[in-house]
């Protein structure tokens, strides 16, 4: 596979000083193999954008080293920039009075697209995000989603080998978001490596090969996406509605009862099942054989549930872990 | 080598074009490139009968004063505006030198304002019926080129300073009028108190003015033009150093872009 697309070792980043000091990243270590998509999750302020900026050479790490295809982001800026495309979403980042095409042409030039190919590449990039018809209009007349599409076109126009996507689907309509996911998946097939942060777990679920969870600047989880989905400990939630007496054996065969509600003689039981296959189905049927069942609904576990569970666990573990591996002074700085 | 030079020229040209496209929509340009020179010309010369020599000197003083305003408000605001648009980080962390990009933008702004100032001044001069003494048109053209180069370099320097201080707008306003008075253009430097005479000496435009005054009334004296060129080179050097320091500091402190 050669050198990793991204290699981050012991990276820390501190903003401000004294009373205003914020530790945005601490001792972050991970890799993105070539051709892989790494999904980065974490709550607001966890440090995802800071990490993206460091890899895009917009920000220096305070400690540690980060490499892009072997090039140090601190010392080999041009080499890193040549290989990297970056999408920071948002309403800003363009010259409002200039047309979408003029903006894109200018920034494509800055990103290293040569003057002989720039016209064709800019037109392709605009077509790729469905902005051809609006290309001549000033960007200040664009809607939020149109600006986001222009950001995406800009990140792709120089054909980078590493793509840094910071919440790329924010503001996109569902059709366009799906189209972006499809084109990200297609990019990976051409060998592009991608670091993707998103609060939409569907993006991560559909695309990521690996999942990194950051909380308060620290890497908490770094696993293959399939493992991450399994780390919830159950595969699906089964909701059963029935009348009369509640079946007794609902918590056998590895099923766990999450909740039972009773409303006017109709009960609703929510069960978590470790897997959802033929055997499980038969066992559930056996358990429900004597009951007066009104309906059964099966929902496979969603990444959203897994993420919520992981965050919950982290919150519970947090005080104990902090006390162990940090001097009290340092820990006090960013938590309060 | 030629390929690199071509690429560099192309980058500067694209930056120049982008700046000029943006300027079309900014009302400040009309103020500094049209209203200001016209008003100054009427105030300074409108009611007087000027000899052809005086006319040249007056128009030169007005055009150069307007150039100063234009430099502060247009080229000097380039990086401050980039921060406003949220494009600063992309502009100064591209594959090309940030100085090259800034040079293109500053040149674009300076040429745009210079054309505006010259055109509107020409209209007023025609209306007022000035008669000119232009004994050395070739040298006047050289002086104009020095003015554009100087405005570009000074614009780059101011753009960096306004970026570093973070209160660029306030500084722009604060700098304009002292230079009107102390710049040695509208008010001759020897009318200033002795302890303030060093101020105009640092302003390249004042030396260009001295050159124009000399040319309009007699033989060509190159010394003042030489000083203007040297000062321009100084501005440029300072600007390049300042920009490098500012960008490095921005990457260290995380102030390049507030996404
Ligand atoms: N330039 C800066 N100066 C000071 N503090 C900063 C700066 N940039 C980020 N921070 C702080 O660093 C921490 C991490 O911010 P970051 O933007 O990386 O979070 P994030 O994970 O991207 O959050 P979100 O999901 O809201 O986008 C936050 O506490 C933030 O306030
Ligand atoms: Mg963020």
Image (cartoon, rainbow, N blue to C red):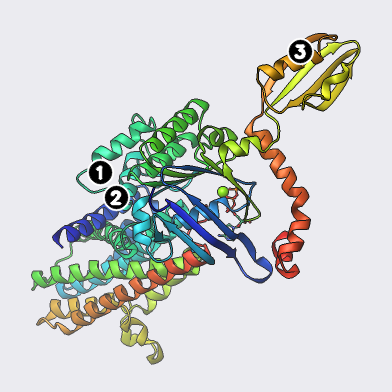
Image position, residue A27 (x, y; %): 59, 61
Q: Tell me the crowding category of disc 2: few under 14, some 14 to 19, or many 20 or more residues within 10 angstroms, Cα based.
A: many
For marks 3 and 1, give the one nearer the viewer: 3
Q: Is mark 2 within 8 Å of ligand 2?
A: no
Between B18 and A25, which is closer to the camera in this rendering?
Answer: A25
Q: Are marks 3 and 2 on the same chain?
A: yes
For marks 3 and 2, give the one nearer the viewer: 3
Tag 1 residue: A118
- Subunit of mark 2? A
Ligand number 1: quarter of image: bottom right
Q: Evaluate if marks 1 and 2 touch, with contact meaning CB atoms under 8 Å apart.
A: yes
First of labels 3, 1 by sequence position:
1
Image position, residue A267 (x, y; %): 86, 16
Q: Give the Cα distance between marks 3 and 2.
A: 64 Å
Tag 2 residue: A109
Q: Residue at x 73, y 70 (%)?
A: A329
């Amino acid at each position: 596979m050669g050198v990793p697309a991204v290699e981050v070792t012991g990276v820390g980043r501190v903003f401000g000083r004294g009373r205003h000091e914020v530790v945005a990243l601490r001792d972050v270590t991970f890799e993105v193999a070539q051709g892989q998509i790494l999904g980065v999750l974490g709550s607001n302020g966890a440090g995802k954008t800071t990490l993206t900026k460091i890899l895009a050479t917009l920000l220096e790490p305070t400690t540690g080293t980060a490499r892009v295809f072997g090039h140090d982001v601190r010392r080999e800026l041009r080499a890193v920039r040549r290989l990297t495309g970056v999408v920071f979403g948002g309403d800003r980042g363009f010259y409002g009075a200039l047309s979408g095409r003029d903006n894109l042409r200018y920034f494509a030039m800055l990103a290293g697209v040569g003057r002989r190919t720039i016209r064709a590449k800019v037109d392709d990039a605009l077509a790729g995000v469905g902005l051809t018809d609006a290309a001549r209009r000033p960007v200040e007349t664009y809607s939020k989603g149109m600006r986001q599409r222009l950001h995406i076109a800009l990140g792709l126009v120089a054909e980078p080998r590493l793509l840094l996507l910071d919440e790329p689907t924010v503001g996109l309509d569902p059709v366009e978001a799906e189209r972006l996911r499809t084109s990200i998946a297609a990019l990976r097939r051409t060998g592009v490596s991608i670091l993707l942060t998103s609060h939409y777990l569907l993006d991560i679920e559909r695309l990521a090969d690996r999942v990194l969870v950051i909380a308060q600047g620290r890497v908490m989880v770094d696993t293959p996406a399939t493992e991450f989905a399994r780390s919830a400990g159950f595969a699906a939630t089964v909701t059963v509605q029935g009348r009369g007496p509640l079946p007794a054996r609902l918590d056998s065969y590895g099923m766990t009862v999450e909740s039972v509600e009773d409303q006017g003689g109709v009960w609703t039981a929510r069960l978590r099942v470790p897997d959802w296959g033929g055997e499980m189905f038969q066992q559930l049927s056996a358990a429900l054989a004597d009951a007066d069942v009104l309906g059964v609904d099966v929902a496979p576990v969603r990444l959203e549930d897994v993420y919520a569970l992981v965050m919950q666990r982290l919150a519970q573990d947090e005080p104990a872990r902090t006390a162990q591996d940090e001097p009290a002074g340092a820990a006090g700085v960013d938590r309060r | 080598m030629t390929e690199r030079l071509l690429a560099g020229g192309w980058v500067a040209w694209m930056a120049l074009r982008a700046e000029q496209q943006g300027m079309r929509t900014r009302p400040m340009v009309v103020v500094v490139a049209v209203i200001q020179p016209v008003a100054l010309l009427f105030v300074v010369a409108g009611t007087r009968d000027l000899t052809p020599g005086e006319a040249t000197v007056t128009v030169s003083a007005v055009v150069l004063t307007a150039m100063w305003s234009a430099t502060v408000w247009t080229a000097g605001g380039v990086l401050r505006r980039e921060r406003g648009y949220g494009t600063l980080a992309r502009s100064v962390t591209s594959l090309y030198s940030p100085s090259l990009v800034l040079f293109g933008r500053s040149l674009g702004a300076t040429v745009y304002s210079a054309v505006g100032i010259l055109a509107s001044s020409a209209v007023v001069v025609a209306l007022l019926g000035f008669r000119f003494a232009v004994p050395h048109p070739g040298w006047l053209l050289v002086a104009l080129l020095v003015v554009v180069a100087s405005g570009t370099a000074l614009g780059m320097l101011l753009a960096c300073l306004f970026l570093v201080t973070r209160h660029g707008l306030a500084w722009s306003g604060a700098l304009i009028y002292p230079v009107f008075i102390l710049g040695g253009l509208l008010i001759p430097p020897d009318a200033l108190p002795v302890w303030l005479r060093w101020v105009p000496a640092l302003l390249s435009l004042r030396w260009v003015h001295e050159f124009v005054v000399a040319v309009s009334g007699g033989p060509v004296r190159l010394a003042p033009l030489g000083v203007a060129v040297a000062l321009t080179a100084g501005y440029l050097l300072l600007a390049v150093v300042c920009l490098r320091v500012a960008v490095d500091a921005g990457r260290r402190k995380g102030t390049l872009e507030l996404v």
